[in-house]
Amino acid sequence: MKQHAVGAQGLVTSVEGLGTMGMTAMYGTRDDTESVQTLHRAVELGVTLFDTSDFYGPFTGEELIGRALASYRDQVVIATKFGGATLDDNGNSVGGANGRPDYVRHSVEGSLRRLGLDHIDLYYQHRVDPDVPVAETFGALGELVAQGKVRYLGISEASADTIRAAHAAAPLSAVQTEYSLFTRTVETNGVLAAVRELGIGFVAYSPLGRGLLTGTLRSTQDLPDHDFRRTAPRFSQEHFAHNLTLADRVRDIAEKTGVTPGQLALAWVLAQGATAIPGTKRRAYLEENAAAAAVTLDPATLTELDQVIPADEVAGERYVPQAMQAVQE
């Protein structure tokens, strides 16, 4: 798989990485055996970027990645996150987003231990703490880079102003935000413009619209028990049928193009210059997704995709109201 620079600080990854949240959290029952085989297959396919967080589980996502990729350390880039919530040492959530410097220092030690690493390749602030100036948070993160505990820095779901302030305090390599044919806020809120101006890499999570753009999800009854999408606004009874109609437009173009709907959706994200990190815990989906990195879309197809899913036509918020409060748009 093609590799490319992510930001201007020296980080290089595959153009498509692997999101691993669903392996231990949010998307139904765990299957560690299949997840580990999926991680190993990703390395075989040339995927080098593996994305996790202390919040996934909590903690179990990092533990799984640490075990599964230990023998591939020199071949992979491990990205993890802190501060999406305040977690105690047992993984209990005891507060909201936390960017306090002391919490930054405490969190990195836990992540290093669970991942079995002497340094983290890419360390993100998962959600911005509204009560702590981001310059203070990234001042502490810059110290971790100087100490060799972290190589590159990132921030997730931050506004353009926050990105600029963080980058001024300690250079950012990556900004991670939801981005897909179904979620294009970063095109109009200044985030994409800011990262391009500052030379920061852009990493797109949920590039498949949480499964809606794959063409395989036809009913919310298809979702596993304990899958968080059962409570997500876009999958609600009020909005799902409308959004499925939009996804079917992508499916129609995919059939003409000779690729799967998911591959078309991923190729669109990659064509925007983003690094895509589709998530899966199954080898079959991984292989389908990875093949999208070889798909080149002509200008006419890109224009058609822009036209069939207008940015303001997708119904429902990305998250429930409480979770949306933690997202800077």
Image: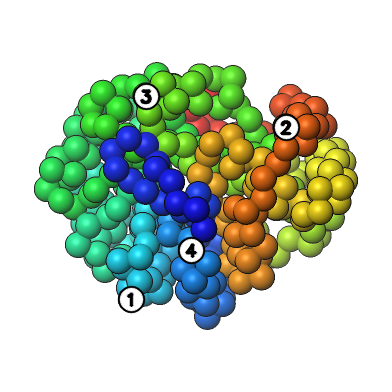
Position above or below: 19 against 35: above
Badge 1 amino acid: Ser
Q: Can residue 159 be seen in this view?
A: no
Label 3 environment density (alpha carbons within 10 Å; few <14, some 14–19, many ≥20): some
Badge 4 amino acid: Gly
Which residue reaches farthest bottom?
Answer: 33
Residue at figure coordinates x 54%, y 20% from the top left: 189
Position above or below: 281 against 104: below
Q: Nearer the viewer, residue 21 or 228?
A: 21
Q: Name the residue under label 1.
A: 71
Label 1 environment density (alpha carbons within 10 Å; few <14, some 14–19, many ≥20): few
Q: x, y (%) of residue 181?
A: 69, 37
Q: x, y (%) of residue 79?
A: 37, 53
Residue at figure coordinates x 23%, y 27% from the top left: 169
Q: Mark 2 points at which residue?
A: 299
Q: Distance between the residues labelled 1 and 3?
A: 35 Å
Colour scheme used in the picture? Answer: rainbow
The earlier-in-sequence mark between 2 and 3 is 3
Q: Name the residue under label 3.
A: 198
Q: Quadrant of residue 142?
A: top left
Name the secondary structure under disc 4.
Answer: loop
The earlier-in-sequence mark between 1 and 3 is 1
Q: How far apart are marks 4 and 2 (CA)?
A: 27 Å
Label 2 environment density (alpha carbons within 10 Å; few <14, some 14–19, many ≥20): few
